[in-house]
Image (spheres, grey):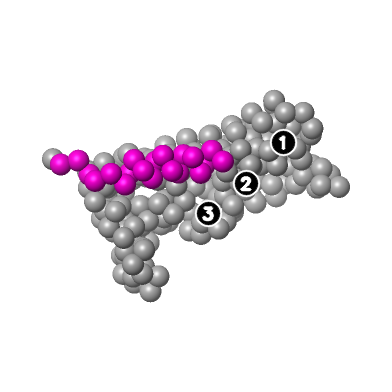
Amino acid sequence: MLEDLLTAVAASPWALPLLFALVLGDAFLVVVPGEAAVTAFGALAAAQGEPPLWAVVAVAAVAATIGDAACYLVGRTIGLERWRWMRTPRVRAAFAWSRARLERRAALVLFTARFIPFARLAVNLTAGASRIPAPRYVAIAAGAALAWAGYQAFIGAAVAALLPGGPVVAVVVSIALAVGLGIAIDAVLARRLRRPPAAE
């Protein structure tokens, strides 16, 4: 039954719009399973041939770029003080952390933050509030989104290609693997980015 459902979802004309909506929502709300959706659709693409893997990567990359750019625009137009949640100690600390590093390593921080959900939101808002030039921001955000989408989809596709058992097994195992790798990468990148900015 579950396999039939996954087959129907993969073949549905709503598959890619659903993926787009989940990835776009993930830019604002870390509880939206954007990463898991890209990985699952990558697994379905390899296991069933649809939706095409290139389309999964392209749609996820475009949605991620638009979502990140929208966060940048919020930071640029509204700032970092407008809403109550922005003034909580944890969020203030995240904004301060982002600002200190964006001043010295904007490209590195913007690129790596795409792979760290909460850091991604803080960095994109701060990039807008710091008025990093929009063309430079969009170029970096688009490159990071494409790398992120390719990475997430490749995990799903690789698991589906290597593991027998049909689309259900491929989706479940690939999501578990993506979550595990994501936790490991988050830890490594967060530790690296927590280091004090190098002195000029």
Q: Quadrant of residue 88?
A: bottom left
- Spot the residue most to the bottom: 84
46 to the left or right of 118: right
115 to the left or right of 138: right
Q: Main secondary structure of the magenta part?
A: helix
Point out residue 73 in the picture as x, y percentages from the top left corner. Answer: 37, 58
Residue at x-position 52% and y-position 48%: 63
Q: Which region is colored magenta?
A: 180-199
Point out residue 194 in the picture as x, y percentages from the top left corner. Answer: 31, 47
Callout 3 touching callout 2 (CB < 8 Å): no
Q: Tag 3: residue type? A: Asp
Q: Say which residue label 3 marks.
A: 26
Point out residue 148 in the picture as x, y percentages from the top left corner. Answer: 49, 39
Whether residue 114 is visible to the viewer of this picture, yes or no, is no
- Spot the residue most to the top: 162
Q: Say which residue label 1 marks.
A: 170
Q: Say which residue label 2 marks.
A: 37
Q: Secondary structure at mark 1?
A: helix
In whole angstroms, how far apart are the C-alphas of marks 2 and 1? 13 Å
137 to the left or right of 183: left
Instruction: Choose the circle earlier in sequence order: 1 or 3.
Output: 3
Q: Tag 1: residue type? A: Ala
Q: Which of the labelled discs sits on residue 160, or is there none?
A: none
Residue 17 lies in the magenta stretch: no
Residue at x-position 70% and y-position 42%: 172
Residue 195 lies in the magenta stretch: yes
